[in-house]
Amino acid sequence: MKRQIFTAEHDAFRDTVRTFLTKEVQPHYEQWERDGIVDRAVWRAAGRQGLLGLAVPEEYGGGGTADFRYAAVLHEEFTRAGAAGLAIGLHNDIIGPYLTSLGTPEQRRRWLPGFCSGELITAIAMTEPGAGSDLQGIRTTATDEGDHWLLNGSKTFISNGILADLVIVVARTTPEGGARGLSLLVVERGTEGFERGRNLDKIGQKSQDTAELFFHDVKVPKENLLGELNGAFLHLMTNLAQERLVIAVAGAAGAEHLVEITTEYVKEREAFGRPLAKLQHIRFEMAEMATECAVTRAFLDRCIEDHTRGELDAAHASMAKWWATELQKRVADRCLQLHGGYGYMTEYRVARAFTDGRIQTIYGGTTEIMKEIIGRSLLD
């Protein structure tokens, strides 16, 4: 079915993203996978191409558009290219809104030009070794020392953790912490006491640097408080709908691409003297997956439209995230099976999609948390 949500301008932007991936990402991606990190130069190349800070005002070097459909195009094309290691979506659509909506004029002048040029790579540090998805369990503390905050604690599973120049840290600024005692502090590269641990060895997304972060008596200037004091919980909740939609967009695009490449594979691969595509079981498998993708796409495109208008609520964002990522996981498993032994070989796209995509049902809130949010919206 022809999609109805994009205009000629979005199609032109899609061409720009594809050209960028072809020239700046795909020739180097295998090396980045081996290195466990991407080259900083590709971030600057993305900035020159206008792919960073799409929603940042033009006065700071951004794209100046609040149209989420451009972000959706970017996520779809990066997913189809298998370029999960370059976490531009995290930078643009998860961290960017905190800087643009919460930043003071001075903070925006200080950080946003580098954010848009690729000179400043960003991360957000919420997860802790003992807290997981539970923000109320955060133990990292920031004590008021008059002219600065004294930050102590640790974080883990932080995407862009090695490369990041700016890290938004969620910390307790009251002894109780919890919903009314968390704040956002921006820690900059080179700050004394801020240390990075190892680049974590993951089963997928190898080129996406994911790190442990440690804060030992880090002096954070008072002017690096982002948003309201003790207001982090509300700030985080406000932006979670977009974060979950971003992940859902990638999930649906990943599933669709796997169906496309598996369709071609079963047409070419023979068993028992004829193409796999001639076997009824294979035809039924492909029919089921294609239908699930089409139905999911209809719902997700509606969510994209609603979010572009500022109307997407937490429950529907959670539905999109749960459904699309579980579909991606299910389709990846079935497509790998249809590839047979070749599906287990890393040289085949389906193998990397299987491992790269497995995190989708976990980060940004697990499937179980999504169901809890939806259930509360119906029953509480």
Image (tube, helix red, strand yellow):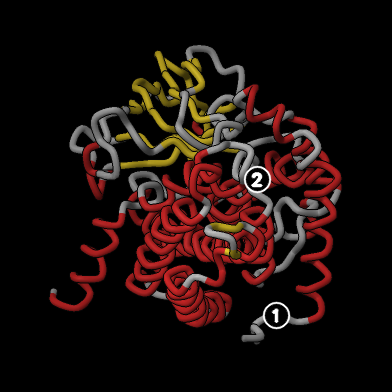
Please name the residue shown 80% across and 66% down the image: 13
**Residue at point 44%, 35% (across, down):** 125
Question: Residue at label 1?
Answer: 6
Circle 2 residue: 83
Residue 14, given in percent of the width and then of the height, sits at: 77, 65
* Residue at the limit of the structure toward the front, as seen here: 273
Few, some or many residues within 10 Å of mark 1 (<14, 14–19, 20+): few
Q: What residue type is labelled 2?
A: Ala
Viewer-nearest residue: 371 or 328? 328
Q: Can you name the residue that lies furthest to the left here?
A: 380
Q: Indicate the quadrant containing the C terminus: top left, top right, bottom left or bottom right.
A: bottom left
**Precedes in sequence: disc 1 or disc 2:** 1
**Residue 239 appearing in the image:** no
The crowding category of the residue bearing disc 2, from other C-alpha atoms within 10 Å (few below 14, some 14 to 19, many at least 20), is many
Element under disc 2: loop
Judge by depth and name the residue closer to the eye, 193 or 85. Answer: 85
Question: Is 34 on the left-hand or right-hand side of 322?
Answer: right
Q: Is residue 369 above or below residue 197?
A: below
Query: Callout 1, which amino acid?
Result: Phe
Q: Residue at x 34, y 52 (%)?
A: 365
* Residue situated in front as seen by the camera: 94 or 298: 298
Residue 61 pos. (x, y %): 80, 52
363 with respect to 283 (left or right): left
Residue at x 53% of width, y 12% of height: 192
